[in-house]
Image: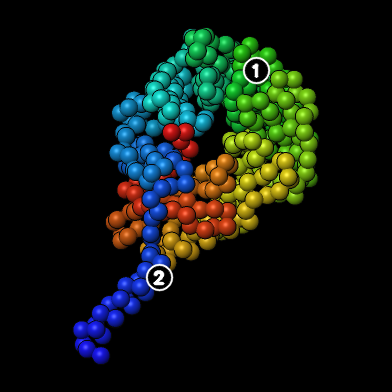
Amino acid sequence: MSRFLLVFIILILSIACAKDEPKVNQEVDEVPFAVTILAKQGATDFQIDLLSDGTLGAPVNLFQKLELPESFNKTIVRDQLVSFHAWLRNDYSSHQIDLSTDGVMINRNYCFNEDSFEVVGIDNSQKYLAFISASVEASGATTFSLNVYDQVADECRSSVIPTIGFPSNFSARGDYFILFQQDSSDNRELLVYDMKDLSLDRITLTTDYNFSVNDDQNLYIFSRNGSYQVLDLENLSLINAGSNQIFENPITDGILDITIQDGKMAFFVLNPQPSTIVSSPLIYDFTSNTVIGDGKALFKLIDELEKQVQSPISIKTFKINLSTEQVVVGYNYFKDASTEIGGVAYIDFEGTLIYNKEIDFTPNQFVLRSN
């Protein structure tokens, strides 16, 4: 056999073997679904769009675009609407961007009360901005009020809250504002306000109450015995009930801000501590009464990424896509003592890595894009 022919055969075999070997950190051309990445670099917040074709948009400085204050208290995502709320005593503002239209809405000191008051917290739905304020009466007693700003009608509404405890846990979705209360004797209740007219219904909770979730139309109440009830928010009639042992795990004596869509709930399980991961994603299917995921997917992802980069991986955030039953994960690691690398990884609930992309920012939150 000639030397030329031998070299040619070795070259062909080398190419064939190289094709068979999986490439580390290989990226497919298209991502499973498009997301907007919310990230912070220094004191500045950025928006980075990762489109379905894998294109990474230029970072948008939200500090400039939304006229954000130097610090804000809360970020809320309602579908394509991202809201940043800031408050300090009686100075407050809401800065919003609709990712589907790129429209910006900025409201400062809306529904301002001339009386002495302080803002306790702010929430929002697509249409309404809602905040709880505290006023000190001449007697020294503190009165809490719900204040609602209808952004479409440009109208304000206010109502004194019949409090039994400090009103710190609440959620605004659709036309409804849900407030959880608990007093020193462990009495618990949910206040259900219709933000159209501030009409009020009160729900007394049992001692085994675990947590509740609401979407635009329904209220889901979960107990530590594993049972749950689904109520129609319009009249609080019972429309469904069930039970699953996954809900026996104590979560919080309050309201969770998680997504329910097409009979499925984006859920999570708290991992035993100490752990590098606080919680792991799950999906609960109300129709089949089944749980998708075993809580191990993020740990499998960390193992795979750490083998690739040879450095400890830190999970920063994740978002469940109920339609595709996949998870987008934000992470970071340090290439050296001064070089921080961010990343976006897509996995299924078995922990299989579908797509991975390193970026110059560490993701804080994801928004599922519609375009």
Quarter in which the N terminus is drawn: bottom left
Q: Which mark is residue 194?
A: 1
CA neighbours of label 2 inside 10 A, class few (<14), some (14 to 19), many (20+): few
Compared with residue 154, is residue 240 higher up or lower down, i.e. above or below?
below
Give residue 3's position: percent from left, percent from top: 21, 87
| Residue appearing at x 61%, y 13% in the figure | 196
Quarter in which the C terminus is drawn: top left
Compared with residue 66, is residue 154 higher up or lower down, i.e. above or below?
above
Task: Tell which of 73 and 186 is nearer to you.
Answer: 73
Q: Which mark is residue 8?
A: none
Task: Tell which of 98 and 262 is nearer to you.
Answer: 262
Residue 189 in the figure: left or right of residue 279: right
Task: Tell which of 202 and 119 is nearer to you.
Answer: 202
Residue 264 in sight here: yes
Quarter of the view holding residue 169: top right
Residue 140 in sight here: no
CA neighbours of label 1 inside 10 A, class few (<14), some (14 to 19), many (20+): some
**Circle 2 residue:** 20
SS category of the residue bearing label 1: strand
| Kind of residue sitting beneath label 1 | Asp
| Residue appearing at x 70%, y 33% in the figure | 220
Residue 154 in the figure: left or right of residue 333: right
Give residue 174's position: percent from left, percent from top: 59, 23
Compared with residue 56, is residue 235 higher up or lower down, i.e. above or below?
above
Find the distance from the CA under tag 2 to the CA under tag 1.
Answer: 61 Å
Give residue 89's position: percent from left, percent from top: 47, 23
Going from N to C along the chain, the mark reached first, 2 or 1, is: 2
Task: Tell which of 132 and 37 is nearer to you.
Answer: 37
**Mark 2 near mark 1, Cβ–Cβ under 8 Å?**
no
Give residue 4's position: percent from left, percent from top: 20, 84
SS category of the residue bearing label 2: helix
| Residue appearing at x 34%, y 31% in the figure | 62
